[in-house]
Image: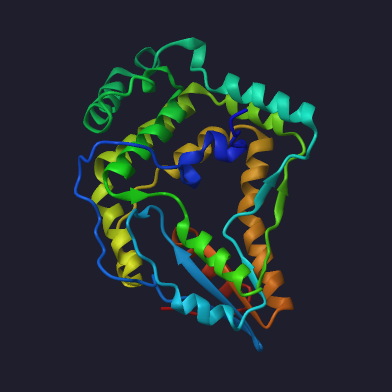
Amino acid sequence: MPPVRYPLLAACALLLGSAASHAQQALPEVVVEGHHEGPRMWRVRRDDHVLWILGTVSPLPRKLIWQPDAVQAVLRQTQEVVPAWPSYGIGANPITALRLYIQWRRMQKPPDHMPLQQVLPAPLYARVAALEARYDPHDKTLEQQRPMLAAERLLTRVLEASGLTARNEVQQTVLQLARAQGVRVRQDKLRIDDPVDVLKDVGATPLSGEIACLDAVVTRLETDIGPMQARARAWALGDVATLRALPHTDNRTACVSAVSTSERVRSLIERAQDDWLMAVEDSLARNRGTLAVQSMDRLLGEHGALATLKAHGYEVEGP
């Protein structure tokens, strides 16, 4: 049985990152020479307890050589590491696993089994076809996918062709270093009590929402490749000022809205986002030193996690 990517990871893989796949080299790759540490970390303090936060961006250069000396130094002063996202748990019931797999397979089919060309408005389909012709002209499977999965596939193809990857290899390196140094990794689990119903809810996403999600992703692929490459380069060089200044085309809001029509799915999204903030505040209270990883887009901004921590009374120092 092939792996099943659960709820958000299944229907919104493009929101959280997706595995790379083969594509033609249609754009110049991002080349970042030498070894880089990424941006300096934020420090969040209360009394003599310190939380270091390493911000990441997605995508990053596929051939980036990352030298985590600063992370290794921080790990020598920490007792716990908090990853960016909780893991997902559905229990070990084999019947549930089988039902989940069957539901996942049903989700792959497009609405009314119609090809993508018949599902999409003609102008949007023309834009999708232009991207497909440029980046993956020999792949005929896109036509048989539902719009939100077609959005994921297109995003994956273009990132690969642009020398970028959405895999969070930075976090994986941090977790490996933590375990090697005997530092606890706090991997909270987001319990999903009704995974089959969650997938049914996602599968019942209104077609208009799926089309809006695909439209937003296509717009990003048409307009944001240069800024994505610039953000990746700025992260590798530790240039936080550039990261703050670069424009960001947001396709996530439309895609999250598309799958958030059910209360069950909305609750999962909110829990996954809120759990990290609760975890770092708890770790900060218990430990003299904690290291956390989180994406820049969730850290920065008026409503970002750093602003929230500051509003909660913590001293926040950053690059």
Visible in this render: residue 301? no
**Foreground: 119 or 135?**
135
Q: Residue at x 63, y 27 (%)?
A: 1
Q: Residue at x 45, y 50 (%)?
A: 167
Residue 90 in the image, given as x and y percentages of width and height:
74, 39
Q: Quadrant of residue 262?
A: top right
Q: Residue at x 64, y 29 (%)?
A: 199
Residue 149 in the image, given as x and y percentages of width and height:
46, 29
Residue 152 in the image, given as x and y percentages of width and height:
42, 35
Instruction: Locate the C terminus by quadrant.
Output: bottom left
Could you tell whether 237 is left or right of 100 in the image?
left
Could you tell whether 238 is left or right of 260 in the image?
left
Visible in this render: residue 151? yes
Could you tell whether 194 is left or right of 233 in the image?
right
Residue 57, compared with residue 285, is above or below; it is above
Q: Quadrant of residue 242?
A: bottom left
Q: Quadrant of residue 36?
A: bottom left
**Foreground: 73 or 295?**
73
Q: Count all numbered tags in the image, as a single digit.
A: 0
**Foreground: 237 or 228?**
237
Residue 27 in the image, given as x and y percentages of width and height:
20, 44
**Residue at the extreme bottom:** 48
Q: Residue at x 28, y 49 (%)?
A: 163
**Foreground: 4 or 242?**
4
The structure's colour scheme is rainbow
Residue 119, compared with residue 319, is above or below; it is above
